[in-house]
Amino acid sequence: MKKTLFLAALLGFTLSSKAQDSLMLRKFYDEALVNGQAYDNLRFLCKNIGQRLSGSAGAEKAVIWSKKLMDSYGFDKVYLQEVMVPHWVRGAKEQAYIIDGNKRIAVPIAALGMSVATPKEGITANIVEVKSLKELETLGEAAIKGKIVFFNGAFDQRFIETGHGYGAAGIQRFAGPSAAAKYGAVGAIVRSITPALDDYPHTGGTVYMDGVPKIPAAAISTLAANKLSTMLKLRKLPLIKFYFKQNCQTLPDVKSYNVIGEIKGSENPNKYITVGGHLDSWDLAEGAHDDGTGVTQSVEVLRILKVTGYKPKNSIRAVFFMNEENGHKGGIKYAEQAAANKEDHIAAIETDEGGFTPRGFSFEGVSPTFLKELNKQWKGLLEPYEADMLVAGGSGTDIGPLKETLPSIQLIGFRPDSQRYFDIHHTPNDVFENVNKRELHLGAAAITSLVYLIDQHGLRF
Amino acid sequence: MKKTLFLAALLGFTLSSKAQDSLMLRKFYDEALVNGQAYDNLRFLCKNIGQRLSGSAGAEKAVIWSKKLMDSYGFDKVYLQEVMVPHWVRGAKEQAYIIDGNKRIAVPIAALGMSVATPKEGITANIVEVKSLKELETLGEAAIKGKIVFFNGAFDQRFIETGHGYGAAGIQRFAGPSAAAKYGAVGAIVRSITPALDDYPHTGGTVYMDGVPKIPAAAISTLAANKLSTMLKLRKLPLIKFYFKQNCQTLPDVKSYNVIGEIKGSENPNKYITVGGHLDSWDLAEGAHDDGTGVTQSVEVLRILKVTGYKPKNSIRAVFFMNEENGHKGGIKYAEQAAANKEDHIAAIETDEGGFTPRGFSFEGVSPTFLKELNKQWKGLLEPYEADMLVAGGSGTDIGPLKETLPSIQLIGFRPDSQRYFDIHHTPNDVFENVNKRELHLGAAAITSLVYLIDQHGLRF
């Protein structure tokens, strides 16, 4: 009997690293699924604070709440990192309609972030519909001058991950208004960038080019875009005009903060693994999936590590970045400070693609050899949790600047299921009710697992 | 130049089987994602027909609509397969409350399918709370006689796939009422089988044992179950009573139908690959995810094969099974007829776990060798579509009986993401609005792909 116990003890001591990892992952998942707090935290953020666009009172409240939350968890260090952010305000609700002779057909519209206002009386003009920036170029000034350009390139449904469709169609929103202004357009309206067909306008940032007049730019719903396009096809162009009025403006920059919580590493306190999402949101709703889920998951990672008694070798940070949506000043500031403080960053993981069921992670700029070895080592550990898609790909806007200041860092993007994200992205429908508790908590557990594996084994593949 | 063309032609002819398969899959996905009709069909089924419990007017309408739909697609053969089904009706809405002294606290309740009614005046009795059938056994007749047994075993959140949690907790609903009746209980109420905490009661079938009195049985919402449990803990038991009244009854069996559409095989017309879901639904809502998505995906598989010009070697069938929810008479009939008609069935695939993002398929009763070879051959083809989880596991209630009558058949279950399914399962919230178009269509494409691969290469691993 004693011999058996002795053998068992021996076996215990020689429990393979894989088996130990496997036990730890199960512990993280149990904690997340049974006692997870991300969902309740998200409810508070959405329902008691709500929209929190950079510079707004909501953003300020969110910063205070976030610090208090991290303090309550008793992390080794919780602090604010100051950063100046843009302060764009939407003003009174936009108005828009299609003018068809005597008829006026109301159009769901939302000014694009950072857009200028229309004149007080609004803009009324003829419309030029284009499906791409290329088509705009071929039309040139003769066709465009004095008109409103209607960017109506559709979301390509054929991509399996909707992020690819968003990237492809998104160029119209980012670059379209300035491209139209170059040819003398007086305004730009953009088909909402979404695979869904409904009446939500999707806002989102646009970027004005230097040296080109800033023209008012707004998104209209996909149903309205279809209707307008059909009307333009059926009727003679000069009979159809478009009217819109918006009241947005950019005020002076405002002081704000990234919120940072930290568990100190037991072996390498100056080596960091950062997990983050962004605390700011667009102003149309509660920023639930974008990116309330990301920040509540990030802090949950630290909470899970702490309550399961795991002592990390390296320092683990949760960062709530400010101002991802219209300027990403928080991400830039964090990268600058990390370099200035000579912090050695092993990896940064961003969660900003919604709080849906986790599928895996994408690793930025890795070689096929890295990917092969990574999968060989860790895929099997994540497979029982169905979060084992470990692929090459992008990471995130907030952590991107770290690559500039700390070139040896590995950037990683959390990859949840992408199908529903762009249905609600940047709309009044991005609310708490559209987040599923289990999906959110599974994501937190998946990220915790990856942080643990990196902390234990590094990322030298 | 000519030489190059000749070489290219040669290369074309020698395009590997894998490359051809890969091209076909892409074709199926493009068709599903760009021109898919499952979503519009589902809208009609949910909004114009609605609930369709076996024996109801809704079920009859659904049969007529389904046949018309298949006819409109011009399949080689469309027909109805007669089957007698149970006809259970809920009657007037149930009522329930907790009686706490003079207070009455309303409880969201729904009779379990196939349950008997309470007496007209309802049942009022003391409550015995148990967390499992085992706990019930240990209490025995002395504690239970004359009482209402309250089955309050919680859904185990630790399973990654919710189906496992459903199976584990589900035993209370299936077998609990009869087990309680054995010890003289006068009624049974069951905590709704769901990971969600809300006010929806989840109905679902219960099964009465022969030789035991049939007692009224109902499900209460998880929030109500928590409240009741807390009250029982805080107050002395005799002070708390429970009242419920339900008006359900089982009428004589009704003639109904499975609806079957077929594309004839070019090489083996008497070999079949069957894809199916169930046309009936519970009566509380529209049966969107359960199982409107399954039937609309099944017919979509045949439509996609047809419009992409694929000529199957074997006959491909879409089957809309009747009466999965309370008797699965449709599945039994289909299996009997397949055997009676000496049809050779290669495989049957069931889609009855919701219309969520596809993750893969589970193969019933396969060996590790089969699974290994299956993954070696096909996983890579399905990986670009993120539907490549090919595992051993269950298939479905409707196709299950085929294994009895045609033992050489391979049964396969379609595996969508499982996280949200049991939140809405069997509730008033199982409505069209909770189905995502892309997720539904990705599922149809995944199943089409598997049908194609089986048709091309068989299932001999």
Image: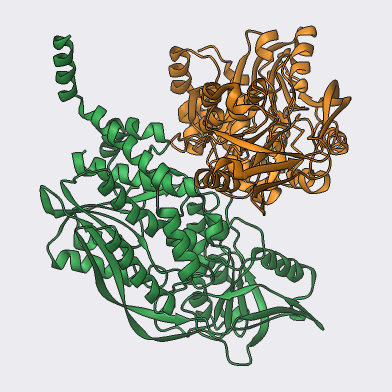
Chain colours: A orange, B green
**From where the camera sits, is residue B401 visible?**
no
Total labels drawn: 0
Left or right of B452? Residue B382 is right
The residue nearer to you, when weighing B322 against A305, is: B322
The residue nearer to you, when weighing A217 against B329, is: A217
The residue nearer to you, when weighing B95 against B35, is: B35
Picture quadrant where residue B429 is located: bottom right
- Quadrant of the image for the N terminus of chain B? top left
Picture quadrant where residue A272 is located: top right
Q: Residue at x 39, y 74 (%)?
A: B61
Q: Is residue B131 above or below residue A290?
A: below
Picture quadrant where residue B197 is located: bottom right
Left or right of A17? Residue A216 is right
Q: Position of residue B386 (x, y in %)?
A: 43, 36
- Quadrant of the image for the C terminus of chain B? top left
Left or right of B405? Residue A397 is right
Q: Is residue B289 above or below residue B285?
A: above
Q: Position of residue B157 (x, y in %)?
A: 59, 50
Q: Position of residue A102 (x, y in %)?
A: 67, 54
Q: Residue at x 28, y 47 (%)?
A: B307
Q: Residue at x 39, y 32 (%)?
A: B383
Q: Residue at x 52, y 50 (%)?
A: B436
Q: Position of residue A215 (x, y in %)?
A: 73, 28
